[in-house]
Image (cartoon, rainbow, N blue to C red):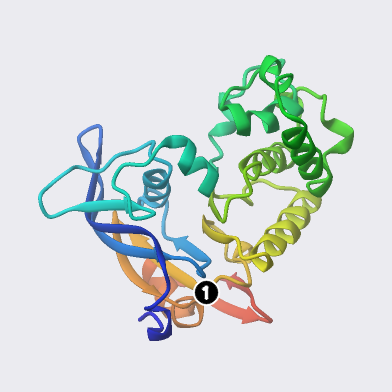
Amino acid sequence: MRDESQKDLIKWASLKNINVYIDHSKILSDITVNLHYGENILLLGPNGSGKSTFLKLLNRSIYPINSNCSSFKLFNKENINIWDLRKNIGFLFKEMEQRVNSKVKLYDVISSGFSGIFNSRYSNLLSEREKNKINTLINEWELNNIIYNEFQTLSDGQKRRALLARALVYEPNILVLDEPFCNLDIKSNFILNKNINKLINQSVNIIYVTHTLESILPKTNRVLLIKEGKILNDGSPGDLINTKILSDLFDISIKVIEQEGYWRMLP
């Protein structure tokens, strides 16, 4: 169960009796949950359980079925302007990498965080303040030597770092990350962990999906367990990330160990 001390935190998202269908298949069922400032939230569950769909509700690329008993609010609004949303929440979805056309440079990908369009013409229209912000992010994400390389020629780690820089151009106080550590080499994994933990220390709240226990952020303080489109449990990592609960969640016999805030799975 969730810690009662969290109950008075301010909500930034409120979902009540949410159902989502895609191609006539029910993906999320009766989701009722509040998300609060001050929480770093992990979504954990088997493939196909609805985790990414849950995150896409937050960026408004997927909409729930409306009913008299359901409601979905972001920042206490049922309808929110997409630009207001982007200024409050930064998003990273791996599929974004496929949306970038060939010949588009890494710099233009980051600058598209302001315009929404991957095109160098819009990079040329940036204000000095926006250019300074992009340059700061390029330094922070260690992308200096490849900013004019074509995005599609980069490694998975470089692409991920560029898209995270893009998500941060408006300095949002919430980051929504779908499998941020997937397919990364050691260097990119280290840079991502270092910078995300730095952002958490600056009071940025993270909600993310990962499929490996080793990628769980040490400062995660809330876990939502999702299976077959339903939230099975909602609590702290200490309560939910253990051998019995995760063996049941993934229908497999595993051993889970924790050491100094980091988790591992053993067969």
- Residue sitting at 80 percent across and 40 percent down? 138
Q: Is residue 223 above or below residue 6?
A: above
Q: Can residue 251 be seen here?
A: no
Q: Please tell me how many numbered marks the rendered image carries.
A: 1
Looking at the rendered structure, the kind of residue marked 1 is: Asn
- Residue sitting at 31 percent across and 68 percent down? 232
Give 49 or 148, whichever is nearer the viewer: 148
Give 73 or 157, whichever is nearer the viewer: 73
Image coordinates for residue 185, horizontal then vertical, percent: 76, 48
User: Which residue, given by chain and number where applicable, does mark 1 sit on?
Assistant: 221
- Residue sitting at 48 percent across and 78 percent down? 243
Q: Quadrant of residue 219?
A: bottom right
Q: Quadrant of residue 34?
A: bottom left
Give 178 or 143, whichever is nearer the viewer: 143
Image coordinates for residue 87, horizontal then vertical, percent: 54, 44
Q: Quadrant of residue 216?
A: bottom right
Image coordinates for residue 239, horizontal then vertical, percent: 45, 82
Residue projecting furthest to the front: 128
- Residue sitting at 71 percent across and 22 percent down? 123
Which type of secondary structure does the marked residue at label 1 adopt? loop
Quarter of the picture holding the N terminus: bottom left
Give 213 or 86, whichever is nearer the viewer: 86
Quarter of the picture holding the C terminus: bottom right
Q: Is residue 167 above or below residue 128?
A: below
Residue projecting furthest to the bottom: 4
Q: Can residue 8 be seen here?
A: yes
Neighbor class of circle 1 (other Cα within 10 Å; few <14, some 14-19, many 20+) is: some
Q: Is residue 48 above or below residue 134?
A: below
90 left or right of 59? right
Residue projecting furthest to the right: 145
Residue projecting furthest to the left: 68
Q: Is residue 18 above or below residue 133?
A: below
